[in-house]
Amino acid sequence: MNLNDYTTFYHETFKPAYADLVATIADKPQQIIFEIENSYSHLMVYLSNDAKISNEIKQSNLDKAYNHLARATMDCYKMLWTEISKFLDNIMHDKVTRAFAFNENEALILNTWNLFKKKAQKARQEEMRSVGVDCNQTILLYKEAVDEGMVLLEKFDYEKFKQVKKFDFVNLIKNQWVGFVSGVIASVVAHWIIS
């Protein structure tokens, strides 16, 4: 690990993950901010001109800085996956919405949704396997899972979704109106028979 590796990881891996998360949830999660602060604290020790700090300690701090940044990146993808999953689960569990709110064949949508879930499971298994070792593979697997979710989101048509919900509401009103009118008629007829 050298400073160039850290900088490359920061720009090419961390920043896109963090930017996507912040854009999706419109917030900066405290957990990620803590990891960034920890990373920068270790980085400052590495960059220090203090002669009392040995090269060995500096290198150890650079490694720690990288590990905090890698953890922040993994957490970004996990949080992003969770947000996408919450949104998609509500849609996918409603058969009517699932069938009509996407610009794609329902079978392909279901297949992509299953891939989205399976890739997250695979990422989680890798995370458990590699705890304390190296999380680069885990980051890649979580990113792949998020990418599957993004494919679904790109095929989701919000206008169609609104139409499906409006249609459901109109049908509910029609069904309730018919029930209400039937109840009034039944009451009048029952009153007339009893009288």
Image: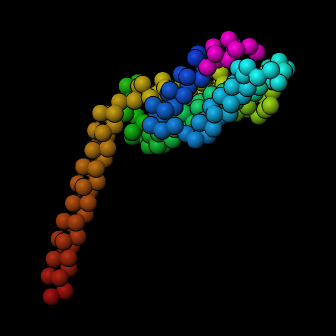
Q: Is residue 124 left or right of residue 78?
A: right
- Depth check: give the residue in front, 44 or 10: 44
Magenta stretch: helix, strand or loop mostly: helix
> Where does the C terminus fall, quadrant-wise?
bottom left
Q: Position of residue 117 (x, y in %)?
A: 60, 33
Seen at 21% across and 60% down, the residue is 177
Seen at 80% across and 31% down, the residue is 132
Residue 8 covered by magenta stretch = yes
Q: Position of residue 67 (x, y in %)?
A: 73, 27
Relative to 139, is 85 above or below? below
Query: Picture quarter containing residue 59?
Result: top right
Residue 135 covered by magenta stretch = no
Relative to 29, is 145 above or below? above
Magenta-highlighted residues? 1-10
Q: Is residue 89 left or right of residue 63?
A: left
Q: Is residue 44 left or right of residue 129?
A: left
Residue 50 at least partly seen: yes
Seen at 60% across and 23% down, the residue is 14
Relative to 129, is 181 above or below? below
> Where does the N terminus fall, quadrant-wise?
top right
Query: Picture quarter containing residue 70?
Result: top right
Query: Picture quarter containing residue 37?
Result: top right
Q: How is the image coloured?
A: rainbow
- Depth check: give the residue in front, 82 or 159: 82
- Depth check: give the residue in front, 173 or 64: 64
Please identify the residue farthest to the top as the structure is shown: 4
Seen at 68% across and 11% down, the residue is 4
Q: Position of residue 183 (x, y in %)?
A: 23, 70
- Depth check: give the residue in front, 133 or 88: 133
